[in-house]
Amino acid sequence: DQQVKQNSPSLSVQEGRISILNCDYTNSMFDYFLWYKKYPAEGPTFLISISSIKDKNEDGRFTVFLNKSAKHLSLHIVPSQPGDSAVYFCAAVFLDTGNQFYFGTGTSLTVIP
Amino acid sequence: EPEVTQTPSHQVTQMGQEVILRCVPISNHLYFYWYRQILGQKVEFLVSFYNNEISEKSEIFDDQFSVERPDGSNFTLKIRSTKLEDSAMYFCASWADSSYEQYFGPGTRLTVT
């Protein structure tokens, strides 16, 4: 079962423009959602998170939006920079004793200079 | 900045052999995880470990897999009899529970021939 889905495997954006990465989930009981960035040959690194009780969280150029009724979250990067080119994973977690994180399949972002 | 380390970076083994992948989580973290990513596919949860025992495991984590925290710093994943389909990147992660940021290691690429 794929509880977290990223339907766009890739995205190309011009430098300076907005990048919007999307993620859908199936289970309304998730407590927290996170975005990770991954460069080749490295482990994922945490970018930004949002609690299920909020609808927006902003950190510098990165903003995550949560639409609970649609079970959808998105990551906005403004302005996009060439160094943002990476694979972006969304993840969701139940805050129980297992604290299992569920990851999407990733979206490869290319920012064109 | 604290980091999760993993050794080796690349392990090549023959089918049927045992492998041990090693991780040193961040020292004050309490939750430890193993994930794998088969080439071109999503990051998949294998197991979570808390208080010296497995707290949750996925259906991938069958009897061929085991985890151990042999001392106060290392966290290991053992695959008893490797199969070709075990070839993947294996990521270790740790989490403090004071934030929702998992720290990932750089990964071990396991190649089973």
Image (cartoon, coloured by chain):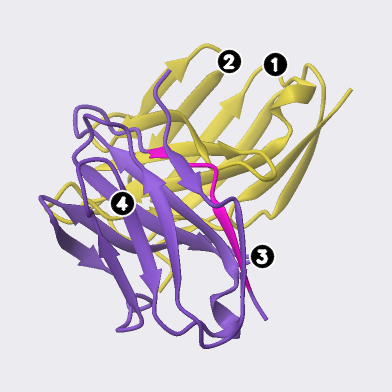
Q: Colour of chain B?
A: purple
Gap in angstroms between the C-alphas marked 1 and 4: 39 Å
Q: In this image, A44 relative to A2: left or right?
A: right
Q: Position of residue B97 (x, y in %)?
A: 19, 34
Kindly identify the amino acid type of the residue bearing the numbered disc 1. Pro
- Residue lying furthest bottom in this view? B16
Judging from the image, mark 2 belongs to the subunit labelled: A
Q: Residues within 10 Å of mark 1 (few under 14, many from 20)?
A: some
Query: Can you see residue A70?
Result: no
Asked if marks 1 and 4 touch (Cβ < 8 Å), the reply is no
Amino acid type at circle 4 is Phe
Q: State whether discs 3 and 2 lie on one chain.
A: no
* Same subunit: marks 3 and 1: no
Closer to us: mark 3 or mark 4? Answer: 4
Tell me: residue A8, above or below residue A42. Answer: below
Give the alpha-carbon distance from disc 3 to disc 1, as whole Å: 30 Å
Which residue position holds label 4?
Answer: B75
Q: Reading the chain from its start, which is encountered first: label 3 or label 4?
A: 3
Circle on res. B39: 3
- Secondary structure under the numbered disc 3 in the rendered image: loop
In the image, A10 versus A46, the foreground residue is: A46
Name the subunit of mark 3. B
Residue at the disc numbered 2: A61
Do tags 1 and 2 sit on the same chain? Answer: yes
The image quadrant where one finds the N terminus of chain B is top left
Q: Which chain is yellow?
A: A
Which contiguous range is marked in magenta?
B103-111
